Image: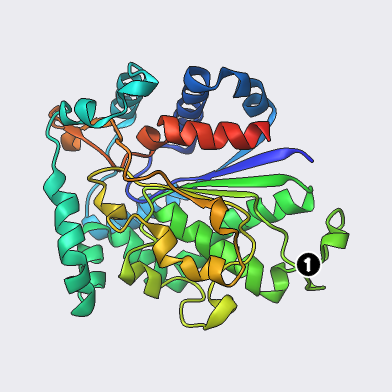
Amino acid sequence: MAKKILFIHGRSYKPKQEDWEKLWKDAVTFGIKRDRPQALEPFRTARKEYIYYGDLSNAFLEKAKNETRPDDIQDRRESLKRLQAYKSHQFNKAHYKKLPNVNPWYDHLADTAGATLNWLHLGQYAIEGYAPDMKHYWSDAKYGSQVRWRLTEALYRAHKQNHEVMIVAHSLGTIIAYDVLWKFSRYGEFRYDKATATDIDPIKGGTPKPVSAFVTLGCPLGDETVKRNLKGASNQGDWKYPSNIQAWHNVAAEDDFICHDDYLKNDFKEMYQLGLIDKAKFTQPRGKVYNLAVRSDHGSGTLRSNPHNGVGYLLHPTVTHYLADWLES
């Protein structure tokens, strides 16, 4: 069975698709070469598909913010180049604290205020203020459907070709992926019998084909407002959750307030209590990791720590080992 990785990006403006794909591929390749060079060939030969919806999110953000998408591809390349200068053992607190303009109060504010905001039903308004594209995803049915369809098509093709699938998702992409996995688990159109895996008839129903690994980076799924808006959130029992995730690996970075509620095993413990996933295969590092990405502040030339950065997550040693373990399994 051939392996296939589906990558899906997160929120905010995105560069052109070909530029984004190269950045992510270069980041993963570098991380594997640095930490697990024996996995380079399995990564090279694995099928890879990059799920891009930046055209949709960019158009929405330009209209919502009344501004033009920044041409920041060179800044993104420079950010990757700086990350490639670090050795594996340097992704630690000491090196993180040396980054320019580190703002730990963002994450602290999200941690301390999050429960109050949700209790007052203001969480959604707070999200709208900072991440309007996230709120737009679940409040505009047409937009949400268009975005999910990009991943739906790719996952359906992978299942039809009988690939072993890993999904690597960042930020808003983790919400999109979770919702698509829930739909593949619970909607009759996407369920099928394992016995017909080489000739899938999605109308038959049956057992949903599993995704062997789900890697979530900078993931907001632990946020109470986000959880209320997930597919299946209003259901009870096992129908509340996807049933097609064999292993879930979550990685959250220090000061990344998008994933301020980072311990997902607590938020989704009912999944393993109900037998939907093996508890031992629902993993994340003890404590948060350190994302050493630095970006120019809104094109001003002022460098600023960017702990939510997708490329910074992708070449972090923790993520490298998750990918390499799967590729070599």
Look at the picture and state if 239 lies above or below 108: below
Q: Residue at point 22% right, 49% down?
A: 67
Give the residue type at disc 1.
Tyr
Q: Quadrant of residue 229?
A: bottom left
* Residue closer to the observer: 12 or 238: 238
Look at the picture and state if 190 lies above or below 176: below
* Residue closer to the observer: 95 or 256: 95
Q: Residue at point 60% right, 69% down?
A: 183
Report if residue 80 is visible in the image: yes
Q: Residue at point 51% right, 29% down?
A: 25
Image quarter (top left, top right, bottom left or bottom right) of the C terminus:
top right
Look at the picture and state if 303 lies above or below 85: below
Residue 2: percent from left, percent from top: 76, 38
* Residue closer to the observer: 283 or 113: 283
Residue 161: percent from left, percent from top: 79, 47
Circle 1 crowding by C-alpha within 10 Å: few under 14, some 14–19, many from 20: many
How many marks the image carries: the answer is: 1
Q: Is residue 15 left or right of residue 240?
A: left
Q: Residue at point 16% right, 26% down?
A: 98
The residue that mark 1 highlights is: 192
Q: Quadrant of residue 70?
A: top left
Report if residue 147 is visible in the image: no
Q: Secondary structure at mark 1?
A: loop
Residue 128: percent from left, percent from top: 25, 65
Image quarter (top left, top right, bottom left or bottom right) of the N terminus:
top right
